[in-house]
Image (cartoon, rainbow, N blue to C red):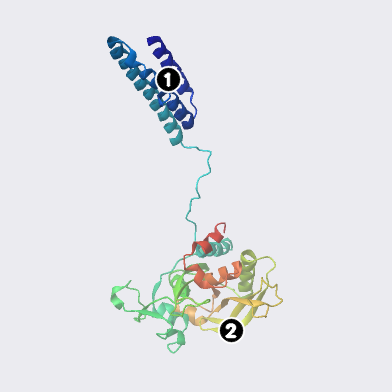
Amino acid sequence: MEEQLKKIENEAQQEIAQAESRERLEQLKVKYLGRKSMVTRLFTKIPVLEREEKAKIGKALNLLKQRINFFLEERAKNFEKKEERIDLTFPPEKINRGIKHILACVDENICEIFKNLGFMIVEGREIEDEWHNFTALNIPLEHPSRDVFDTFYLDLPVSDYGGENKGGGKYLLRSHTSPSQIRVMEKRKPPLAVISPGRVYRPDKVDASHSFMFYQIEGFCVDKNINFSHLKGVLFSFAKSFFSEDVKLRFRPHFFPFTEPSAEVDISCMICKGRGCSVCSQSGWVEVLGCGMIHPEVLEACGIDFDRYQGFAFGMGVDRMAMLKYRINDIRLFYENDLRFLEQFYEV
């Protein structure tokens, strides 16, 4: 019987080592240790053996059972290691990567276009004083934009912030990026060609086309013999680079306190190609920015001789430019942080 037990052990060890699945391992466990297995049948023969043989064969059978269990457990560990191994060829789950906000992309795009035209980029301050935000820009005291309903005034002591409150007026959250123009012209001499992006604040009621905080870009150029044709040339070049080579521009007379003459600029509606639609109110044109020749009073406030130097300035809303370029009909979508909206601009 000892030879028979040895034979069973060798066969069991060989079959278990060749098992390629957990299912096959379970079948071998039943074959060698189950109720109808060879080992179990040998246990039933022990009662008919001699007394000395009983102890000897019983011990050998228990040892065989332990050995087969050991073979099964070791083989099962190999399967566990294989299952824990990382399959590098298996497609991973989608990883949500952070991307630049659409407004940041549009802002950078606009600045890069003007940078290629020779403009330098200067970022201004968001907290301004009345002199830089209004007075130096030829905006009189009675102008509606200086009203508390149109400007976020701040309760800051004049002597405690920056030490540059030239007119001694109140501090405020800038209502446009034009104060950057004043600060640059105060400190630097012409020729100047500057683009200034940044956030601005106005207490507007939030709706599809208005927000209390939005982004603007101010641009200006000051040098000898600058005229309106230079302004038109710069804006034509920008519009064709930003929108399309097919875009058309229209300049309409307007009034701004800080420019004279002043104009509002429209582009041909890219949705209807000028035929008229709901976006352009059936006119075929969409307003994009304001511009004009810098008012002599503004140049004088900055210490620039307006008899020798002239300049032009323009300002545009980054949010509005993005809405026009990507046909977005609600400014609130930019600030709601809805990934379904933001992920559409992954490649912008």
Location of the C terminus (image quadrant):
bottom right
224 with respect to 302 (left or right): right
The amino acid at mark 2 is His
Q: Which image quadrant is residue 53 in?
A: top left
The amino acid at mark 1 is Met
Location of the N terminus (image quadrant):
top left
Q: Is residue 99 above or below residue 333?
A: above
The label nearer to you, 2 versus 1, is: 1
Give the structural element (helix, strand or loop) at label 2.
strand
Give the structural element (helix, strand or loop) at label 1.
helix
Q: CA distance from mark 2 to mark 1?
A: 104 Å
**Where residue 169 sits: x, y (%)?**
35, 82
Tell me the number on the disc at residue 202: none
Q: Earlier in the sequence, mark 2 or mark 1?
A: 1
Q: Residue at x 47, y 28 (%)?
A: 27
Q: Which image quadrant is residue 276 in?
A: bottom right
Front-most of 116 and 152?
Answer: 152
Tell me the number on the disc at residue 254: 2
Q: Residues within 10 Å of mark 1 (few under 14, many from 20)?
A: some
Front-most of 222 and 100?
Answer: 100
Read off the residue under disc 1.
38
Q: Residue at x 52, y 72 (%)?
A: 331
**Where residue 241 sits: x, y (%)?**
63, 64
**Where residue 70 sits: x, y (%)?**
37, 23
Answer yes or no: do the residues labelled 2 and 1 have beta carbons within 8 Å?
A: no
Q: Residue furthest right?
A: 275
Front-most of 267 and 284?
Answer: 284
Instruction: Specify whether residue 83 is in view.
Output: yes
Q: Is residue 255 above or below residue 275?
A: below
